[in-house]
Image (spheres, rainbow, N blue to C red):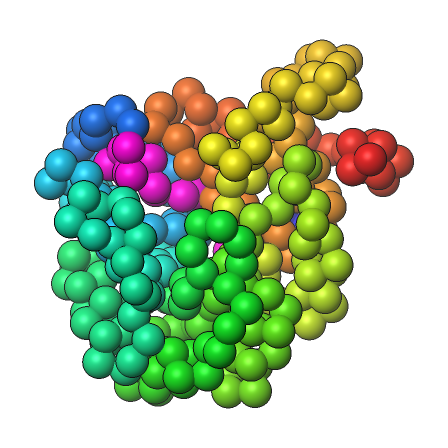
Amino acid sequence: MARDFDLGGTRVNRMGFGTMRLPGWPIGRRSDAEAAHTILRRAVELGVDHIDTAWFYRRDGASSNTFIREALHPYPEGLVLATKIGPRFAEDGHTPADPAHTLGELRRDLEANLTELGTDRIGLVNLRLGGIDGPFDGDAHEPFEALATLQSEGLIGALGLSNVTERVLDQALAIAPVATVQNSFNLADQSDAAFVDRCAEAGIGYVPFFPLGGHVNPDMLEQPGLVRFAEERGETPARIALAWLLHRAPNLLLIPGTSTPAHLEANVGAADIELTESEVDALRA
C-alpha cells in the first residue's frame, strides 16, 4: 500500500487531518484553543502534512484557521494547507446562503483565508458549490475560471473541487488541471466508487469527507460485519474503516478530524494496518 501521494506537485502522507471539529463548527462542543494547538502540533509530529480547513469553520469567535496559524506558523516545509471557498452562510453561521461565484466574491473568500492563516499562498484550494443535499451538478465554468485566475496570480498552489459530480469535473478539467476531488465516500456510502476509480486512473486525489460516516451515516461504525471484523483483528471499527479506505484505492487521501489527542493518534496509526485484497473486498460488500 502506498503511504503517500503527489498532491499538486507535493508528496503528502495519505493520512491527513481535518480541522472542522476544532472550533465546534457548525454546532457541538465548545472549542478549546490550548487543546486545538496541542492536536495540530502533535499531528505534524506524527507526519501529517495535509491539513484541511475553511474560513467558515468558526464558532463563538474561534476559528480553525486561527488555531492553525497560532499552532504552526511559520509553517514547516512540505506542509500543504487545503481550504474551501465558495460557501456562504447566514448570520447564524451554519445555515447555507447563496455560494460565491464571481472572481470578486471568490477573491474576497480567498483573501480572508490568506489573512487568517498568515500566508501569501495556500497549497490547495477546493471550490465548493454544492449544498448539503448532494453533489453539485450545475454550471461551474465561471467560478472555476475565477479560481484558475487566482492560481495564475500565485495565490494558490493546486486547484480542487468539493461535493461535485463527474460532469462538473469535466467542466473544470477543460479549464485547468484538478488536483483533488473532495466528495462523500466511506464504507456506508460507496456511491462514488466509479468516480474514485476514474480519479485514480487520472492521477487525481480523492478526499472523502466523513470517512467515518459523520452525521450522514452515524451508524456506520456499528455495522455488524465491520464490528465483527474489527474484533477479530483486535482493532476498533474506526481504525479498520480508515485502513479500508487507504487500501481501497491509492489516490484516497484521508482527513479524519478529532478534538482529542488520543483519537488523533489512533486515526494516524490506522495507516499501519495491513489488509489483504480479499479482506478489502469482503468489507466492501
Q: Is residue 12 magenta?
A: yes
Residue placed at 62% from the left, 27% from the top? Answer: 220
Question: Where's residue 74, x and y in %?
Answer: 21, 55
From this viewpoint, is residue 11 visible? no
From what the image shows, is residue 127 above or below residue 261?
below
Q: Position of residue 39 (x, y in %)?
A: 32, 32
Image-based side of 105 in relation to 162, left or right: left
- Look at 40% across and 84% down and name the residue there: 142
Q: Nearer the viewer, residue 195 or 93?
A: 93
Magenta highlight: main SS: loop
Query: Up-down: is 101 above or below 280?
Result: below
In the rendered picture of this protein, how many numbered marks are placed on residues? 0
Residue at the spot x=21%, y=52% of the render?
Answer: 90
Q: Residue furthest right?
A: 278
In-image side of 279 versus 70 (left or right): right
Residue 119 coordinates in the image, percent (x, y): 21, 64
Residue 235 visible, this orientation: yes
Q: Quadrant of residue 227?
A: top right
**Residue 192 on the magenta span:** no
Residue 218 in the image: above or below residue 126: above
Q: Is residue 206 left or right of residue 282?
A: left
Outermost residue on the left side: it is 61
Extent of the magenta region: 11-27
**Looking at the image, which is closer to me, 4 or 154?**
154
Q: Going by the image, does 80 lie left or right of 4? A: left
| Front position in the image: 74 or 198 | 198
Q: Quadrant of the C terminus?
A: top right
